[in-house]
Image (cartoon, rainbow, N blue to C red):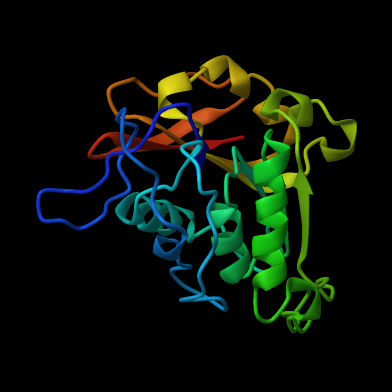
Amino acid sequence: MKTSNHHSARHSASGRRLALRSVSGSHPRPASDLRIISGLYKGQRLRSPESALTHPMGAREKLALFNLLQPYLNHESKVLDLYAGSGALGIEALSRGASRVVFVEKSPRIAHLITENLAALNPAPENLPVPSPTPDQSLPARPSVQVFPEPVSTFCGRPEYLSYFDIILADPPYDNFHPEDFANISRILAEGGVFILSSPAKINPPEIPGLQQETTRTYAAARLTVYHR
């Protein structure tokens, strides 16, 4: 989920609403279009801000992202959702079993909406049963969530999250894309962790200090790139 200063395309020639990149002069997708794809919360709806500031990731791209993520996501995963918008990506990860999800969204108003979306989940994250441990594993904790209304660069400097996250997801605004924002991503990614970046397809995947690019794939105007530490 990304923030942007431009409006999204209103609809396709067939009249169906699509999650397109910004096109001036139209309106954002309605909140009813945001649904959780799979897992515990499958089918539950998420609210999105009624403004042109947020652009939900397209359903095809979102499905592709979580297909790429499937080998890495489990009940011990600590996930970070950057440029979180409505929180759709992080909540999808939570629905699929992540043990902890942290959301970073610089707009306080939109960050508050993430909190509202989390509160509306049924069952609430804090009421989920503790998963049964597999052999040779300690008992995992209940899923936990936290929302930070601050810029990505500020959060990446937090010392308490040094080498902490197993998975980092970033879906920044395409019309305000700054690869330098990811300069310190490696410091908060755990050894062996994965970083998945959504970026414009027309731009080559950026080099990320301290990370190795594993694969990159394009979906219409979008590019998904997987990095490892």
Q: Position of residue 27 (x, y in %)?
A: 36, 42
Image: 99 above or below 210: below
Q: Position of residue 125 (x, y in %)?
A: 74, 72
Q: Residue at x 68, y 29 (%)?
A: 152
The tally of labels here is: 0
Q: Nearer the viewer, residue 225 or 125?
A: 125
Q: Is residue 171 visible?
A: no
* Residue at the limit of the structure toward the left, as seen here: 13
Q: Is residue 123 visible?
A: yes
The quarter of the displayed image where residue 138 is located: bottom right
In depth, the one of 171 and 113 nearer the eye is: 113
Residue 101 placement (x, y as % from top left): 70, 56
Occupied quadrant, residue 67: bottom left
Give the camera-side residue of 103 and 179: 103
Instruction: Name the residue located 52 percent from the left edge and 29 percent from the top edge.
Output: 212
| Residue 49 as seen in the image, left or right of residue 200 | right
Q: Residue at x 71, y 80 (%)?
A: 134
In screen coordinates, is 136 left or right of 16? right
Q: Position of residue 107 (x, y in %)?
A: 67, 35
User: Vertical placement of 138 versus 187: above or below?
Assistant: below
Q: Quadrant of the C terminus?
A: top right
